[in-house]
Amino acid sequence: MYKQLLLAYDGSEQGQNAILQCAEISQWTGAIVTLVAIMPREMVFAAPEGGFYSPEQHALEKQKYKLILDQGLRILSESGHVAKGVVLQGETIYEISKYARKVGADLIVIGHKHEKNWAARWWRGTSASSLIEHAPCSVLMVITP
């Protein structure tokens, strides 16, 4: 069945629910779990005189995503699962799909929450369906009510 699980983790409630599902699947199948946290590539900030790149702000953002990743790894570890993790930088859907190919993932697990407001659904777009179109394997969306 599944030998390699890839969990896209962002620290949200949806992500935490996805960790629980991923841990359960791993327990059933003995699959290896890899967590990824995706940091946006462009770290350009607006200022009155124009945009600028801040190495200090970039380092702070990278640390923030590392802390998110460490939190997910700690949750898995406390439930008795061994997992590895990596912070990736770039466009979320592309990076998840690319890394899933790299590690030979059989299943990508992500958390998702349905938006009740039509405007919020429209504004957020369809990243979940985009991932399904680009993923090299099956995708499990763990829905948080």
Image (cartoon, grey):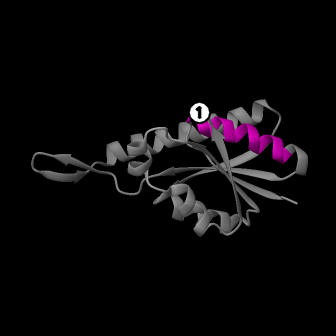
Count of residue discs: 1
Residue 1 on image: x %, y %: 88, 60
Residue 14 vertical placement versus 95 (above, below): above
The quadrant the C terminus occupies is: top right
The front one of 118 and 136 is: 118
Span colored in magenta:
12-26
Q: Secondary structure at mark 1?
A: helix
Please tell me which residue is depicted at 71% across the width and 66% down the height of the picture.
Answer: 137
- Report which residue position mark 1 lands on: 13
Q: Quadrant of residue 134?
A: bottom right
Please tell me which residue is depicted at 78% across the width and 58% down the height of the picture.
Answer: 4
Q: Is residue 39 left or right of residue 54?
A: right
Q: Quadrant of residue 10?
A: top right
Q: Amino acid at mark 1?
A: Glu
Residue with the most extreme front position: 118
The crowd level at tag 1 (other Cα within 10 Å; few <14, some 14-19, many 20+) is few
Residue 17 on image: x %, y %: 67, 36
Q: Is residue 139 left or right of residue 48?
A: right
Please tell me whether residue 88 belongs to the stretch shown in magenta: no
Please tell me whether residue 16 belongs to the stretch shown in magenta: yes
Q: Main secondary structure of the magenta part?
A: helix
Residue 79 on image: x %, y %: 80, 32
